[in-house]
Image: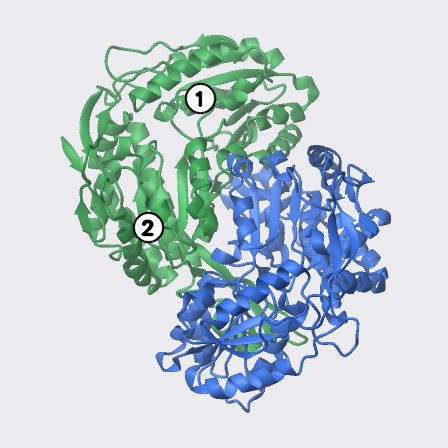
Chain colours: A green, B blue
Amino acid sequence: MITLSSYLCGTWQAGSGAPTSLFNPTTGEAIAEASSRGLDLAAACEHARTVGGPALRALTFAERGQLLKRLAAALHEHREELLDLSQQNGGNTRGDAKFDVDGATGTLAAYAHFSKELPDATTLADGEGIQIGRTARWWGQHVMTPKLGVAVHINAFNFPGWGMFEKLACAILAGMPVISKPGTQTALPAHRMAQIAVESGILPEGSFQFLCGSAGDLLDHLGPQDVVAFTGSAWTGAIIRGNANLVKNNVHVNVEADSLNAVVVGADLDLGSDTFGDFLAFTSKEMTQKTGQKCTAARRIFVPSDLLDEVVPELVAALERIVVGDPTDGGTGMGPVTSASQLQELREGIDALAAAGTIATGGSEPVGDKGWFLRPTLVVANDPDDAIFHEKELFGPVAVVLPYDASKGPEEAARLANKGGGSLLGAIYCDDGEWAKACALGMAPWHGRVWVDSARAKGQAMPPGMVLPSMIHGGPGRAGGGQELGGLRGLEDYLQRTAIQGFGGWVKAEFGAPEPVEAS
Amino acid sequence: MITLSSYLCGTWQAGSGAPTSLFNPTTGEAIAEASSRGLDLAAACEHARTVGGPALRALTFAERGQLLKRLAAALHEHREELLDLSQQNGGNTRGDAKFDVDGATGTLAAYAHFSKELPDATTLADGEGIQIGRTARWWGQHVMTPKLGVAVHINAFNFPGWGMFEKLACAILAGMPVISKPGTQTALPAHRMAQIAVESGILPEGSFQFLCGSAGDLLDHLGPQDVVAFTGSAWTGAIIRGNANLVKNNVHVNVEADSLNAVVVGADLDLGSDTFGDFLAFTSKEMTQKTGQKCTAARRIFVPSDLLDEVVPELVAALERIVVGDPTDGGTGMGPVTSASQLQELREGIDALAAAGTIATGGSEPVGDKGWFLRPTLVVANDPDDAIFHEKELFGPVAVVLPYDASKGPEEAARLANKGGGSLLGAIYCDDGEWAKACALGMAPWHGRVWVDSARAKGQAMPPGMVLPSMIHGGPGRAGGGQELGGLRGLEDYLQRTAIQGFGGWVKAEFGAPEPVEAS
């Protein structure tokens, strides 16, 4: 049994007391354990603030970008080992594991690339300077400086690698030290990545700490210059956002919660079209990649009522072609869910959905005699307005088909999609540009991202569930009301914006954006 | 006795039950009363969402900018009446009243001006488009669309006019309907301004509602598409931010709380200089304008120890020249505080500060036999690190002088200024550009705005306490962790950012920024 320890205050330390076990979800065997009990989290916060922060802030944005580039390379050297650990602890197929591990290194590399737009300076000019007096001798300039505290990152179990490093990339580039906590149940690859990061010596001491196990009283030690970024359930997100200490100190909290992402089949979509082909391929993939344990997974599929009888069998056929089994077998398309409790919740949830609809494929019966396997499951709703389908999220390979009245126009599809109460993603498959535009605009206020596939994009569309470093990830309401990534927007959580006012020449020279350098 | 009613759901309605009295703080006489008890606030929210929101969103950003311009003009027509009401209910000198009333019309006009940068469209492109596929045929664009809910604005008693319309300007321009609640005790001018706004017919029905009295259960009716912007005490701010319904629904909340703003006299400042002259004039003004009831008022004045004996008498002399009395008298420099409870809190607070320092002028004794008057009060701290001076905010004409050891460099002044735990404003008086830069950068992470006066800016500096529409207003930590204004940044609270992805030509044509029009 491997014991995973935490890297805090410059040393690896194991917690005391009864540890939490980590399992191989394919076999149900315990493979590691972790505990954070008794670890001095107040000291870790101070270590970040007094050692890591000053070291990072002594570097320029450009220099911090170089750290990310080197870190991406260091992690990539261990790719095979990390993929193995990811498969072992996460129940991931090799493709699923790549999605997480390569997502981590890719996002680090992307932020290293974005940093080329940043100055070789420790302060960032935000926008243009502004004349604020009667003459240009009295001048204003917004500047961004790193917050002086610690960035606490609390990640979800489904992306131990990507989740840790997409957050870290933004914080480190902004100049804030990080304490990163993975979801304990799948912490094995995160722990190894943390080891690699520490052993590489790339990040200044104190700028990266790793807490393996419960977050304990960590939030109680935070103050106004600290930041919390959380990814996980809406339920836990609300507990964090409402934490009395965070509220009292106006600690900035970013929440990215799971959501009931929408997929819309446009009215009059030709079922022989490439766009419908994409719908089948992408949707079956988005339901089953990472065994549906993905915050951007397809959950609610809106299909014009008059197409229902044709669409459902085709989607069922696509799902039934996916081989469920040991994810280390090359032919397997979908592995197990990551825990026994996850399986139990899903089984109960499928039964609840089935009571308000019809199971078209799959169901709540587990598969096999060991591990935590389910079949890809599709439920067809009796009534698309039934609240259960818009409120009950099953974090697994389960989606609902909801018929909608396409004669009411794209607004009807958007109205139903928006009943999710705020989602990370809405995907639209539609060859009518006007219809797609109206649907996209109708969904925009309730969705952090709207993805639209059409014949004109043939062969070009990237999968809808893929989160890109250059575009924001987050959504309103149920999805947490937060925002991550989005290129350099992702740094804003970690920077304080300050309006500087003073003598024009001085403000421009000391705080203005550098003059563009002529290409030589 | 005037009864102030609320404008909700298209009609003026008075609440039931025992009303709250509004007073003339100069005389202590009750002059009006208000109650919101029994008003249907759930219906008001729905009215905003179903009537006001759609009407506003049917207009383009440019058209909404025109509404603000017309509203500024409509209010300005009633300027004299509004100044009178402001003096009567707020205890304002005419100058104080102008600061509020002209601040309201000025901010509306400024946002009308800013709207010229916005497209004649209902959607806003955010940043450049981005190639996100292998070719430019797969493309991403961030867009901003108005949130579909209601913007609830809860304002402070000190700026009934400016507070209402600086928030309204941003929400209306963004496309969100407003329910505006003034601080009840000084609601008389706000109520009249609301009447003028309603009677003018400029804003579409449902896009502006006015709640006079307690906020009641208003927050319990809000959901994910709604926004709350609050200005007031840190204590109330924390209650709002921690409200269970707002937390559960991830309702966006912006808090602008009062803070212990810092003033720094730079090391080696020549006391015969223009910069020192500015320090005396601005600081005495910032302590006493609006009788110190200003979120940007000077609270903590950091003076090099070796200059203390010279600076304090000069500042005392400047303060003692200010005539305290009936604010409607032309010669009066400072009127009363706005309530009996405010006076009582200040008296107790002054005694508490005096126990840890020396009163240089003023004191806790009230002035006169009617109304709620105090003298401008300056306390010299025994120990600049004493927590009481950095934590106890007196919302009145009271400041503390804190000596600092200038031999330790500008970092020492910044360290002490930052002990305020997050402030809206830090003002620096310094003729040494390098020193000022180091002090400003040291203060930046803890201050929403840093204002620097120097000889080079002679005669140009605008007063530090003046909040400009073009620059952000807000600050970290104790100051609420929020941000208002800042030009078009001020609209972001009311817009949802959505990443649109799709076929390049379609995304660019439908969601990209319009091509710049050639000047003709």
Q: Chain of mark 1?
A: A
**Image-based side of A81 in relation to B12, left or right:** left
The residue drawn where x is 50% and y is 17% is: A400
Q: Which residue is mark 1?
A: A281
**Image-based side of A184 in relation to B419, left or right:** left
Indicate whether B473 appears above or below B497: below
Indicate whether A334 appears above or below A437: above
**Image-based side of A17 in relation to A457, left or right:** left
Q: Residues within 10 Å of mark 2 (few under 14, many from 20)?
A: many
**Position in image of residue B59 (x %, y %):** 75, 43
Q: Are marks 1 and 2 on the same chain?
A: yes
Amino acid type, callout 1: Ala
Amino acid type, callout 2: Val
Q: Quadrant of the C terminus of chain A?
A: bottom left
Give A363 or B313, whichever is nearer the viewer.
B313
Q: Which residue is mark 2?
A: A178
Give B231 or A178, whichever is nearer the viewer.
B231
Q: Earlier in the sequence, mark 1 or mark 2?
A: 2
Indicate whether B293 appears above or below A385: below
**Can residue A384 be seen at all in this image of the molecule?**
yes
